Amino acid sequence: MSPEAPPNGSTRRDELLRVATKLFAARGYHGTRMDDVADAVGLNKATVYHYYASKSLILYDIYKGAADFTVDALHDDPTASARETIYHFTRRLLVGIASDIERAAVYFQEGPYISEWFTEEQVEYIREKETQVYEHVRDVIDRGIASGEFHECDSHVLALGYIGMTLGAYRWLRPQGRRTAQEIAEEFSTALLRGLIRDETVRTESPLGVDVRAGAAHD
């Protein structure tokens, strides 16, 4: 790999982040040295330190990118039903995870230890984003209950379960697998929503509330 020409027009910093993400996912944060990153990207360590003053700053950029992506995926059409909102969020999440499995793996593998490596402000930023995701999912479920679209349920428990079901998919989701991320999102959402929707006809005939073939354009 030429150190002068990062692929696809990316910057050198982008390339360092991409390579480090793959190494952290495969070897773990503790198992990866800055020398390893430098060797893999074809630079000397001094040049790597020019872009990232510490290994923890690389990890934080990985975390921030993942957290920001997840919050960005929350955006809603205010005219959409609660079930449509959940489906579209699920689709955006799973398609995004499938496009960067290593980043998701690093996020969850290193999650228990970030307070050791990040500043208080950095940890607070990540936790705030995680809270936003939880509150959004909970609020959408509550909206569906209030409108009569969904059965009564414990939205707190269901939101936590939903987050685990979707974000944990990085462990087995594969871009070239038997089912696409879009198809898996349809399966996940259908199973969840058929347990929530009150109206029997809607639950049976259109649990996602949309034509899934047009779903990818709903961004």
Image: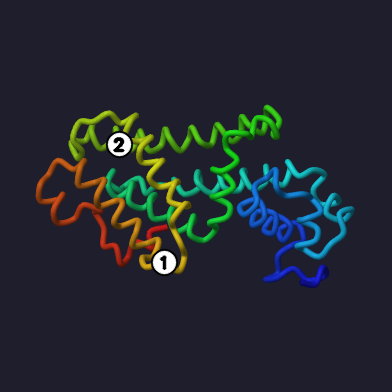
The picture places residue 6, in percent across and down from the top left corner, at 74, 68
Task: Name which residue lies at 49% across and 55% down.
Answer: 97
Residue at the extreme left: 200
The picture places residue 34, in percent across and down from the top left corner, at 79, 50
Determine whether the residue tagged by mark 2 lies in a helix, strand or loop.
helix
Q: Which residue is mark 2?
A: 141
The picture places residue 153, in percent across and down from the top left corner, at 23, 31
What amino acid type is highlighted by mark number 2? Answer: Ile
Closer to the observer: label 1 or label 2?
A: 1
User: Is residue 120 toward the left or the right of residue 149 in the image?
Assistant: right
Determine whether the residue tagged by mark 1 lies in a helix, strand or loop.
loop
Q: Nearer the viewer, residue 145 or 42?
A: 42
Quick one: quadrant of the C terminus?
Answer: bottom left
Residue 129 against residue 87 in the figure, above or below: above
Residue 187 against residue 121 in the figure, above or below: below
Q: Residues within 10 Å of mark 2 (few under 14, many from 20)?
A: many
User: Is residue 123 toward the left or the right of residue 205 in the image?
Assistant: right
Q: Which residue is mark 1?
A: 177
The picture places residue 88, in percent across and down from the top left corner, at 36, 53
Q: Nearer the viewer, residue 36 or 84?
A: 36
What amino acid type is highlighted by mark number 1? Answer: Gly
Task: Name which residue lies at 77% across and 49% down.
Answer: 33
Task: Name which residue lies at 30% across and 36% down.
Answer: 141
Q: Nearer the viewer, residue 201 or 178?
A: 178
Number of disc labels = 2
User: Is residue 157 toward the left or the right of residue 119 in the image?
Assistant: left
Quick one: quadrant of the N terminus?
Answer: bottom right
Q: CA distance from mark 1 to mark 2?
A: 30 Å
